[in-house]
Image (cartoon, helix red, strand yellow):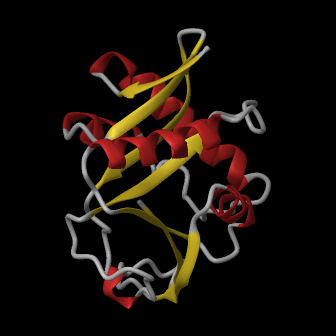
Amino acid sequence: MMDIVKCTEEYIAEVGAMYDNAVFALENSTNYPRWIYKVYPTVENVKRCTENGELYICINNDRAVGAYKLNADPEGNYDKGSWRRQLKVGEYLVIHMLAVAVGQFGNGIGKAMVGHALETARKGGYKAVRLDVVPDNLPAIKLYTGLGFTYAGTADLERGIEHVPEFSLFEFNL
């Protein structure tokens, strides 16, 4: 049975290793999100997000099989999006760093985590959930659009990431 909970200190090392393994596997196949091994995401990101109460993990049989960050910070210029609903920062939540453990793809973990994010936003009184992905990250785009997210344009979010100059934006209005 899967359970999605906020990450706690006891899971930091395991979740950090899960991200490391996922990024290593991506770099040795098709690196859709263009993450960089030991650069992003890392155990340091996991620790910081856990301390901030922003990291959720999917637990199955006492093991972390997925994780994502959820907060109100777009970490870039979301004003460039062609949003269907004009909202201010703080009126929506943003999904970041969503990853599924190597060997767990296709088990519904990503779908469960996105559903959890939507429910968390609803319960928190937010008006939408937004996110951005690398434009050619087809598995992520398929996941999000399949769950009802709508495309809101592709733009330079002014993050200063040379190898990812633009991101495709998606929203789910609540």
Viewer can see residue 153 = yes
Q: Position of residue 117 (x, y in %)?
A: 43, 45
Residue drawn 62% across the image and 14% down it:
1
In the rendered image, the vertical position of residue 119 relative to residue 89, given as above or below: above
Let me know if residue 39 appears in the view. Answer: no
Looking at the image, is 170 positioned above or below residue 18?
Answer: below
Indicate whether 75 appears above or below 110.
below
Q: Nearer the viewer, residue 24 or 103?
A: 103
Residue at (31, 82) in percent of width and height: 86
- The residue under the point 20% across, 35% down is 51
Q: Is residue 92 left or right of residue 60?
A: left
Residue 88, quarter of picture = bottom left
In depth, the one of 35 and 57 nearer the eye is 57
Residue 44 shown left or right of residue 31 in the figure = left
Percent coordinates x, y for residue 172 in the rendering? 48, 64
Which residue shows up at 75% across the image and 32% down it? 107
Q: Quadrant of residue 148?
A: bottom right
Count the labels in the image.
Answer: 0
Q: Position of residue 80 (x, y in %)?
A: 38, 90
Classify the position of the C terminus by image quarter.
Answer: bottom left
Where is residue 132? Give x, y as percent.
49, 69
Q: Quadrant of residue 106?
A: top right
Q: Is 65 rendered above or below residue 116?
A: above
* In-image side of 18 versus 50 (left or right): right
Of residue 8 and residue 16, the one placed in the foreground of this image is: 8
